[in-house]
Amino acid sequence: MTFDDFRQGYLTISDAWTETFQTAVSKLFNQELTVSTTVGEDQALQPVLQELSFPAVWVAFQTTGALELHHAVVLKTQDAARLFGWMTGTEPPESLAADQLDNLKEGFDQIINQLLAGQENGYEFELQNLSVEQVDTPPEGIAETGCSATLNLIVGEDTLPLVHLVWGFDAIDLDDDAQAGSGEM
């Protein structure tokens, strides 16, 4: 699968999932919000990682099924603290403790599983190995190439960017029948 094929599939799926994602996030974090997505034009992930600010909250997981992919969602620690505060109806903490990261993990698990349950693209994915941690630098094992996107959660005048990195599609060898399909991921 080429980067352009994967990128186009990502755009198609993100368009289809925007409403589900927006509803799930709004409900979980008790905020009326809108979501806008910008998908990266380049397949190099290292420059994207270099632009991120650390420490940050790193949400890592894999999806298995039709495509086996690795994912990381990266957000600023203070934005993760705001999400925690909204989710619990409390003031955002100054820093995130292990139990607060566990609560965020449960929240991300709910959101991702709602997205995966609402699939209408003919592929079925399962969530695997979800972790949420605060990191000072990007963890090891990030591929050189992949696809990146920024999901902006817009609440009133505020924007909370979530950077989504996904890799592993370069190892996918589609058969002729799949390549002749609709062009979706």
Image (tube, helix red, strand yellow):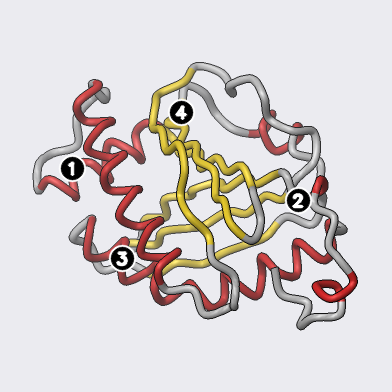
Q: Amino acid at mark 2?
A: Phe
Looking at the image, tell me whether mark 2 or mark 3 is earlier in sequence order. Answer: 3
Looking at the image, tell me whether mark 4 or mark 3 is earlier in sequence order. Answer: 3
Are the residues at dot 4 and dot 1 in contact (C-beta closer than 8 Å)? Answer: no
Viewer-nearest of discs 1 and 2: 2
At 79% from the left and 57% from the top, the residue drawn is 41
- The quarter of the rendered structure image containing the N terminus is bottom right
Q: Which residue is mark 2?
A: 169
Characterize the local packing of mark 3: few (<14), some (14-19) or many (20 or more) Cα atoms within 10 angstroms. Answer: many
Q: Which label was assigned to residue 24?
A: 3
Q: CA distance from mark 2 to mark 3?
A: 26 Å
Q: Which label was assigned to residue 56?
A: 4
Q: Amino acid at mark 1?
A: Gly
At 22% from the left and 65% from the top, the residue drawn is 27
Q: Which residue is mark 1?
A: 85
At 39% from the left and 26% from the top, the residue drawn is 133
Residue 156 sits in which quadrant? bottom left
